[in-house]
Image (spheres, rainbow, N blue to C red):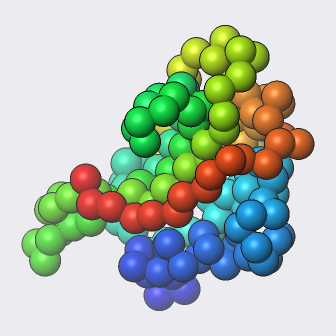
């Protein structure tokens, strides 16, 4: 699709959306980040017109990836990358991780994940509304750490 951004531009597009709300990462609240992720999630990229080529993943839980337990919200965009013959080669994921210090209310949420795929027939606004409901306890909070990165999977 010539009018769509290239997958290689996705991390930059997410950074731009986040900076549009608050230029300094230390000032981003969960609400700021969520609104930016929704704008980013609505942007279409040049992917194959298949139901699993462009997906959004919302997940959270308490994990000790950095050595100490932190409640982590991971907002992810996953793209299917095809080879020159049009066959699946690998996926690229663009992550925005929000980490919060341990709090009993957050730990009580347990873990959760939900996928949305463009071109699969589901309603994006309904999915966003349902996921925002899962963030209700955090919307006014500022994460202790925020990490933006891209990785092949």
Q: Residue furthest front?
A: 67
Vertical order, 17 against 9 (above or below): above
Picture coordinates of residue 35 (x, y %)?
78, 56
Q: Nearer the viewer, residue 96 or 76?
A: 96
In this rendering, would 123 be left or right of 84? right
In this rendering, would 85 be left or right of 124? left
Does the rendering let one see residue 61? yes
Q: Nearer the viewer, residue 50 or 114?
A: 114
Picture coordinates of residue 78 (x, y %)?
41, 54
Q: Residue furthest left?
A: 85
Vertical order, 90 against 133 (above or below): below
Q: Quadrant of residue 74?
A: top right
Picture coordinates of residue 1 (x, y %)?
45, 80
Q: Residue furthest right?
A: 140
Picture coordinates of residue 131 (x, y %)?
70, 34
Does the rendering let one see residue 122? no
Q: Quadrant of residue 116?
A: top right
Q: Quadrant of residue 44?
A: bottom right
Identified at 48% across, 33% down, the residue is: 68
Identified at 64% across, 65% down, the residue is: 40
Identified at 62% across, 74% down, the residue is: 15
Q: Nearer the viewer, residue 24 or 84?
A: 24
Vertical order, 5 against 68 (above or below): below
Identified at 51% across, 28% down, the residue is: 69
């Amino acid at each position: 699709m010539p009018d769509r951004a290239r997958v290689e531009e996705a991390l930059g597009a997410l950074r731009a959306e986040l900076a549009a709300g608050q230029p300094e990462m230390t000032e981003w609240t969960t609400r700021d980040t969520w609104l930016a992720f929704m704008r980013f999630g609505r942007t279409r990229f040049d992917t194959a017109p298949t139901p699993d080529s462009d997906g959004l993943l919302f997940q959270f839980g308490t994990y000790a990836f950095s050595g100490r337990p932190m409640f982590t919200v991971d907002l992810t965009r996953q793209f299917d990358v095809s080879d020159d013959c049009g066959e699946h080669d690998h996926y690229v994921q663009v992550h925005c991780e929000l980490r919060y210090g341990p709090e009993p209310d957050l730990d009580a949420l347990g873990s959760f994940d939900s996928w949305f795929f463009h071109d699969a027939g589901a309603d994006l606004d309904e999915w966003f509304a349902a996921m925002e409901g899962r963030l209700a306890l955090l919307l006014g909070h500022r994460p202790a750490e925020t990490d933006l990165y891209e990785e092949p999977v």
